Amino acid sequence: MRVLYTNAIRFPRATIVVAMLITLAVAPGMLRLRLRTDGHALVPAEAPAVRLDEAIRAEFGLDDPVVVVIHSNHTDGIFNVHTLELVDQLTRSFGKIEGIRPARVLSLATEASDRVWPGTLRFRRMLEPPPKSPEDLARLRRDLREIGLYNGTFVSSDGASAAILVGVPSGRDRLDLLKSIQIVVDGLGSVPERIDIIGAPVAEALLGTHILEDLGVPAGWLGFETFEEGRAVHDASGIDDSSSVHVNSLDALRNWISRNIGLVPLAIAVMAVVFFICFRSLIATVLPLMEVGAALVFVFGLMGWLDIPIYLTTAILPIIITATGITDEIHVFTRYRQMLRAEPGGDHAAIVMKTMDELARPIMLTSVTTSLAFLSFALSTIGPVRAFGIFTGVGSIFCMLWSLTVIPACFVLLSPRRFLSDRHRGTGGWGPLWRLFHAVGRTVCVLRIPLLLLAAGVVAIAPMGVKRVVVQDSWIDGFAPGSRFYQATQHFNDEFHGMHVLMLVVDGGREKVVNGELSASDVDARTVRLPAAQVEKLGPLDGWRILLERTTPPNLSGDLRAPTHSMHMAWTYWVEGSELEGDRVTLSLAAGRPSPLHVLRLQPEETVRFELSPVPFMRSDVLQRVAGLERFVAGRRADAVGGVLGPTDYVRTVHFMIHGRRDGMRRIPNDSAQIERVWREYGNIRGKERVSQL
């Protein structure tokens, strides 16, 4: 360390030039910085929970939704022509955004009803055609009330708001997607409805950008300059017009400062004032701030060159580096001024050398200790935590090297009068503030025993408060309670099922499929006999599915009575009962399909292949248990549960709809054949992808 400041004192100009060149060489890396403030960036990709979540989303075809909420002040809520047309228009526009699959954009405009187009079997969508007359609007309101599935998901409980869900594909840049959605909304111009853009991806993406904004980074640098202040997504401050805001509360003042000044510039300004008051020298105020600026440029430039994004954890680096980077200068400047007073007219370079000889070791020890403490975070399994520790440590080391090189070089080049004027040389250097703290220190020494006892008591009592500490893991609570985003989210949680979705995956089992061959004598009109050795350990087989397939094509020559469906080689049946009879288990086949003897045209000497497999979600008892789980979860209101929507809701509703909305038909069918029909009808109406999501 002595080599550094010795050469800096001998070659001050060269030292400053080298330091500036190193900083400027790293600076262009700041242009390569990118934001990564979403929640997925905060957890390791190899974590078991993350892998499980990704596997479930891939299996079911699920995305995190961005929620676009349209709120109408119309007396009839959303049930007016303009609002419903707006829902339809935005749904189609969002489906055209690059990278968004139209099938993952859901709203009233995408959902089917049980009404068909005249003369066809094609089901209409809820807004097809868009309701125009009072009768059409009344019918839509009645349909939504009777179907029930869409209330709480696409329509609020008070009927005043509608929601459009836009699925965010895995790997899609969320800030870029939010900008695309906002551009579509902006393209509407002035509309009477209020449009808010919320959702977990929005909260995760915007919280980091708002933190950077609060720190003083211009919004345009963050990549969402098109989001105007006060619009749906961008406004997280509660202040619509920063140029004409009336500061009437502490929160409003704090928000105004963060939006118009920034916390880093404010912190630098406060430190500048403190330095100026303490040292009463402009140059003693500027030099520490130059060090802080150089450290920030170096650290963030290095992050850019190494392609390390700005995470939520590293977003607070400016404040930490600003606060810790100038602590060494306080000691150096204080001691340097003391020596100038003690040796007036002495050799200036020698005074600087004595100052650094005395303070270099403490500076090194405190800086290295601080850096090692931060660098210990490099052992974390979480990437953003590692980045925080490493680059905070790098910033501390940079500030230490700057204090040991550039600062003494500046001392040598600048006149001592710039740090200590002639009129302050004979004052001893101690002002009223120092005398106040000196008196406090003397008092502490006198009352050391009582103060130590008091401190020990505080330390003994303090751990009791640990039990009161809670983990605040809500992204939404990171926004100002008065902000539009926060309030829109709270409204959605109150009037809809809730913004955050907890996925409960019920696994019905992965039992091995049983297969083999049977003789024609084992197949009757409504029963099939299987070897007990193969199936008796499986337990009750009610609700299982059995496939019967001929091993050879049927001989239909000359049989003019053979129906066309007898040409099928295989048929599937549902088992509605099983009974052990000797070395055979007799399966009773559910009605609704033709006899296997009739359709397979089996002859006594022929064989048939069978395949027996469980289909849990075609069984009434399984669905009833799932319904019980749904009821249990729905009852946990105290645990922040909003609405609950599961497969049994769809089974009951589709069963109700395909039976003409008759009373008593909103239920889970008792037999597997009817349940299969419900799932098949739902798939015919909404497609296989929607079935797989359930």
Image (tube, rainbow, N blue to C red):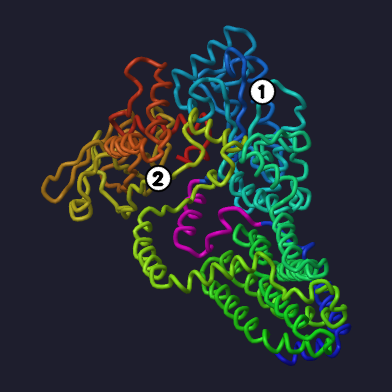
- Left or right for 82, reference 605: right
Q: Earlier in the sequence, mark 2 or mark 1?
A: 1
Does the stretch in magenta take in 44?
A: yes
The front one of 679 and 119 is 679
Q: What residue type is labelled 2?
A: Leu
Q: What element carries label 1?
A: loop
In this view, the residue in front, 374 or 287, is 287
Residue pointed to by mark 2: 504
Of 553 and 364, nearer the camera is 364
Q: Which residue is drawn at 39% across and 25% down?
A: 655
Residue, disc 1: 193
Query: Where's residue 287, x and y in %?
Result: 79, 71
Foreground of the two, 475 or 255: 255
Quarter occupied by residue 147:
top left
Residue type at tag 1: Glu
Q: Residue at x 68, y 56 (%)?
A: 35
Q: Is any part of residue 618 visible from this angle?
A: no
Residue 433, x across and y down, in percent: 65, 65
How far is mark 2 from mark 1, CA to CA? 35 Å
Res 83 seen here: yes
Query: Is the C-beta separation of discs 2 and 1 under 8 Å?
Result: no
**How many C-alpha atoms fall within 10 Å of the one at disc 2: few (<14), some, or many (≥20)?**
few
Q: Which residues fall within the magenta stretch?
A: 36-60
Whole-percent x, y for residue 650 in the image = 42, 31
Residue 376 percent location from the top left of the image:
54, 75
Q: Quarter of the image for the C terminus: give it.
A: top left
